[in-house]
Image (tube, helix red, strand yellow):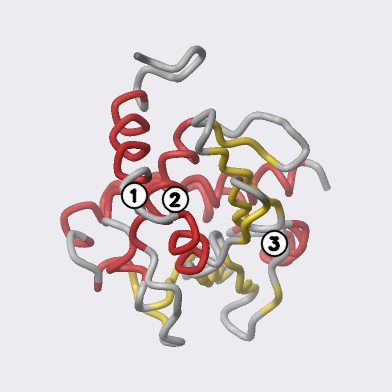
Amino acid sequence: MEEEGVDQRYAGALETSWEDFFQRELEELAELSGGTLEGDKLNVGILNRTAVVDPSSRTITWSDGSDIDDDVKVLLLHYMLRSAGRVEGRLASYREFPGGELYYSVFHGRAIVPLIRTFGERAEALAIAGEKLGASRASRGDASIDLRFFPYVPINVTVWEGDDEVPASANILFDSIVGSVMPAEDLAHLSAELVEMLMEADREA
């Protein structure tokens, strides 16, 4: 039975993910995802906010009760089911991961291009927007931020401003373990979500 109000583009993925979720112990999922248990609910960080996963009702909401987009719910469930509960501390590029070459054009078009379009001539704005999402500044490029989309998904976002001779550029790097936690397709989608959140934070500045 399909959940009421679910975006039908993600209904199948949500259903499958929930079925896989119920095959696992809640305590194990909490430990490996970096979440915390509160009764029979699981709290997991997404950037500077907290998602509340309620298996009894098959719902995922923000801690204030507001809705989370269905595509982000899918990403969260996939992450929880595959997280190793650790990071490796080495940054890697999207192309280094399995499937990264195949999906690179998607990753570049949906994440890198809007990142350059928005922050390529306003690098400091990236740092300011990132701080609103809980990021810390890093020493790379003209502006760089380190953040964790999920507790065990560290990401670095960097922008280099262009000039008359060299166009602006940007890159998104991930802890090297992320390639075994998230398929390339999911990671492209997550990167696009992250850039959209940065753009939204920038618009609210």
At a point 31% along the width and 37% down the height, the residue shown is 19
Position in image of residue 185 (x %, y %): 28, 49
Evaluate whether residue 199 shows in this view: yes
> What amino acid type is highlighted by mark number 2?
Leu
Q: Secondary structure at mark 3?
A: helix
Position in image of residue 183 (x %, y %): 27, 56
Nearest to the observer: residue 166 or residue 31: 31
Mark 2 surroundings within 10 Å by alpha-carbon count, few (fewer than 14), some (14 through 19), many (20 or more): many
Q: Give the residue pinned by disc 2.
A: 190
Position in image of residue 108 (x %, y %): 35, 53
Q: Give the residue pinned by disc 3.
A: 130
* Picture quadrant of residue 164: bottom right
58 relative to 18 in the view: left or right: right
Nearest to the observer: residue 173 or residue 86: 86
> What amino acid type is highlighted by mark number 1?
Asp
Q: CA distance from mark 3 to mark 1?
A: 21 Å
Q: Which mark is residue 186?
A: 1
At a point 73% along the width and 48% down the height, the residue shown is 202
* Picture quadrant of residue 125: bottom right
167 relative to 52 in the view: left or right: left
